[in-house]
Amino acid sequence: MQEDVDAFFRDFGVPVFWKSVDPFSPDAMAFLDFPDEVVLERVVLHTAATLTYPSGRLAGLDEGETIQVGGESYRVRERPRRIDDGRLTQAFLTRA
């Protein structure tokens, strides 16, 4: 059984604007997560924003570019990479 990934993101994701000029038509719907990065003895150094979205939705997005996620500006920290079975892509972000 093939799951409808787009429907899942459409129902639960936040809008991502990258190249879209229409404020009512986001380039993608995605999940924005803020997991803690733990280094040495349970000390949290900083919180890294992680954007997860259906692969192909933000094709060409690269390190250093600025995007709008849920109304906030973020800069892509490193080149996005596909995860798991390749149907999803993750990008690590910092606030712009």
Image (cartoon, rainbow, N blue to C red):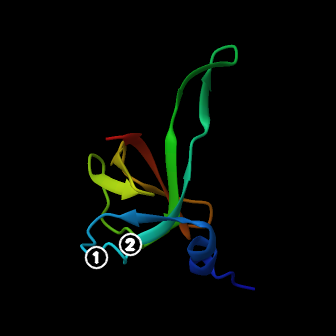
Q: Indicate the amino acid at tag 1.
A: Asp
Residue drawn where x is 30% and y is 65% of the image:
60
Residue drawn where x is 24% and y is 73% of the image:
21
Give the percent coordinates (x, y) of residue 49. 50, 43
Number of marks drawn: 2
Res 9 → quadrant:
bottom right
Give the class, few, some or many, for how many residues have Cα within 10 Å of label 2's Cα (few <14, many ≥20).
some
Outermost residue to the top: 41
For residue 50, side relative to residue 68 (left or right): right
Q: Nearer the viewer, residue 26 or 92?
A: 26
The quarter of the picture where the C terminus appears is: top left
- Looking at the image, residue 75 lies above or below residue 85: above
Give the percent coordinates (x, y) of residue 70. 45, 57
- Looking at the image, residue 68 lies above or below residue 43: below
Residue linked to disc 1: 22
**Residue at disc 1, secondary structure:** loop
Give the percent coordinates (x, y) of residue 67. 33, 55
Query: Do the residues bearing badges 1 and 2 touch, measured as CB atoms within 8 Å?
Result: no
Looking at the rendered structure, which numbered label has been put on residue 26? 2
Give the percent coordinates (x, y) of residue 24. 37, 76
Residue drawn where x is 36% and y is 42% of the image:
77
**Residue at disc 2, secondary structure:** loop
